[in-house]
Amino acid sequence: MKTALITGAARGIGLATAKGLAAEGWQVALLDRDSEALAAAAEALPEALAIDADVSIAADVERAVREVQAVCGRLDGLVNNAGVADFGPIRETTFERWRRVMETNLDGPFLMTQAFTGLLAAEGGGAVVNITSISGLRASTLRVAYGTSKAELGEIGIRVNAVAPGPVATKLAMAVHSRDIIDAYHDALPLNRYGSEEEIAAAVNFLLSDKASFITGQILAADGGFEATGIGLPALRK
């Protein structure tokens, strides 16, 4: 049975990805630092391995490797989904705010991918999917830290790709998107709506699957056409 580890798996895109993989017969490991939300997610997926850990803390990551090795014995897919968002212009982005974003959004995927490379390679190769953001491909107002944080291992059989979601109706997005911003996104997107967590999960699941066996080093923008249209949103400048 193939096994995947998803970080930031207690809710949103991470949990949707885990549910999608479990439905396809994968064994899944859920990693999150929100203990309460992780417990709730584990109840929804009782066969999953729940790991209470912070991807930005090296000791936590090393412990996660031991837990996955002990319980699952293998790893075929790693989804680096854990992330934090921060809105603010550069003059108001303190170094503390910058580091809070970077330690999770950049340090985390580095620590996780480095630590799990051996386990991913052990069965002849695997796949890593990093959840980035359309903000890493296209500049957007008030996102100096977040956008920067989102801006290979092929020879040992590990494929590495990224999914760059556009606006998705997650708890994280809804916490920082005002009604004006939501309306502006709807106007700017060719598909005229936010994406769903399940739609992003489907893109992740494809890149983890054997159907993507010759795809590596790519960024898939699952964004409703956002990257292809316009620049900026007036509501973000208010």
Image (cartoon, helix red, strand yellow):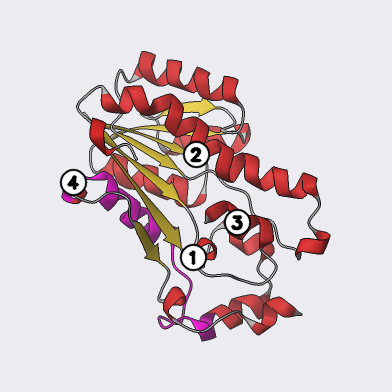
Name which residue lies at 33% across and 23% down. Answer: 119
Mark 3 vs mark 2: in front? 3
Q: CA distance from mark 1 to mark 2?
A: 18 Å
Question: Hey, what amino acid is under mark 1?
Answer: Leu
In primary-sequence order, the first of circles 4 and 2 is 2
Where residue 70 appears, as percent x and y from the top left, is 37, 13
Question: Hey, what amino acid is under mark 3?
Answer: Thr
Name which residue lies at 50% across and 36% down. Answer: 110
Identify the mark at residue 108; answer none if there is no mark: none
In contact (CB < 8 Å): disc 4 and disc 2 = no
In primary-sequence order, the first of circles 3 and 4 is 3
Considering only vertical position in the picture, is 40 above or below 60? below
Question: Hey, what amino acid is under mark 4?
Answer: Ser
Q: CA distance from mark 3 to mark 4?
A: 29 Å
Part of the protein shown in magenta:
186-211
Q: How dense is the environment of label 1, judged by Cα within 10 Å: few (below 14), some, or many (20 and up)? A: some
Identify the mark at residue 213; answer none if there is no mark: 4
Could you tell me which secondary element the residue under label 1 belongs to?
loop
Residue beneath disc 2:
109
In primary-sequence order, the first of circles 1 and 2 is 2
Q: CA distance from mark 4 to mark 2?
A: 21 Å
Q: Which image quarter holds the C terminus?
A: bottom right
Q: Is residue 238 left or right of residue 213?
A: right
Q: Is residue 33 visible?
A: yes
Q: CA distance from mark 3 to mark 1?
A: 10 Å
In primary-sequence order, the first of circles 1 and 4 is 1
Q: CA distance from mark 3 to mark 2?
A: 14 Å
Residue 106, by quadrant, is top right
Residue beneath disc 3:
148
